[in-house]
Image (cartoon, helix red, strand yellow):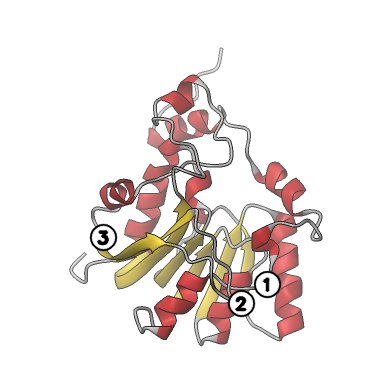
């Protein structure tokens, strides 16, 4: 007999067990650094560069959620941010630390679940983590924002469109718990999920750029209201 549910987090953990993508899966993904994976390139997201160039986001304390090999965290550090990068994959963190040493950059990279982070940040940046979460973990994601994003701070993320990610209804993931490549979203989905934040911009990522960009991703910028 197994009785493990006593609170909401217990329910979320049980639901986690339905899905197969975990830290070990991501370690295998990052183990071969020579694989032709577009976001293995050492270029920041074009959208992140654009936010800074237009003054929509200014230097402060930043958290890179699902930082992978550190390309965006290193860019933020070079632009004057104090940066922490977290990822479930120890392989990804090792690669990010290697890149930081090569660049002479200071970034606090940690192999850690982002939902356990306790700091406060002016910018929470997410390049491709959100769309790999099963639907029930949006609850944890919003709790992270409520706890860790400073009033007036920004959430910036990139996530799959429904053309690239799955367009299945949320309930269907629990009948057949396979996320595939990830969950696809429409702009109105993002507006609804992040309704407590003020929308700054939602658009498709640009592909015609010297930085990282593909047109099957949405790029979205939200601001936490100062009174929040």
Q: Quadrant of the C terminus?
A: bottom left
State the SS at label 3. loop
Viewer-closest of 95 and 162: 162
Disc nearer the start of the sequence (1/3): 1
Q: Position of residue 152 (x, y in %)?
A: 27, 73
Query: Upstream in the sequence, badge 1 or badge 2?
Result: 1
Residue bearing the label numbered 3: 197
Residue at the spot of label 1: 42
Could you give the CA–CA distance between mark 3 and mark 2, rounded to whole angstroms? 26 Å
Contact between marks 1 and 2 (CB within 8 A): the answer is yes
**Going by the image, does 204 lie left or right of 152?**
right
Q: Secondary structure at mark 1?
A: loop
Q: Earlier in the sequence, mark 3 or mark 2?
A: 2
Residue drawn at x 43%, y 66% as measured from the top left: 124
Q: In 3D space, how far apart are the residues under numbered discs 1 and 3 (Cα atoms)?
A: 30 Å
Element at badge 2?
helix
Residue tagged 2: 74
Spatial distance from mark 1 to mark 2, Cα to Cα?
Answer: 9 Å
């Amino acid at each position: 007999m197994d009785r493990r549910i006593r609170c909401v987090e217990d329910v979320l953990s049980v639901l986690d067990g339905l899905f197969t993508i975990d830290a070990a899966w991501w370690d295998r993904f990052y183990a071969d650094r020579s694989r032709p994976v577009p976001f293995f390139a050492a270029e920041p997201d074009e959208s992140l560069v654009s936010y800074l160039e237009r003054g929509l986001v200014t230097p402060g304390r930043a958290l890179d959620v699902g930082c992978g090999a550190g390309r965006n965290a290193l860019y933020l550090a070079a632009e004057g941010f104090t940066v922490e990068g977290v990822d479930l994959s120890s392989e990804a963190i090792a690669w990010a630390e290697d890149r930081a040493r090569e660049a002479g950059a200071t970034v606090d990279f940690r192999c850690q679940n982002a939902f356990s982070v306790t700091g406060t940040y002016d910018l929470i940046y997410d390049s491709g983590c959100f769309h790999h979460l099963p639907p029930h973990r949006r609850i944890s994601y919003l709790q992270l924002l409520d706890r860790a994003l400073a009033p007036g701070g920004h959430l910036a993320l990139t996530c799959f469109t429904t053309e690239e990610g799955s367009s299945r209804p949320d309930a269907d993931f629990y009948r057949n718990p396979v996320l595939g490549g990830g969950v696809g979203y429409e702009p109105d989905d993002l507006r609804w999920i992040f309704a407590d934040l003020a929308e700054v911009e939602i658009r498709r990522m640009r592909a015609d750029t010297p930085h990282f960009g593909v047109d099957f991703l949405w790029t979205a910028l939200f601001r936490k209201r100062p009174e929040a």
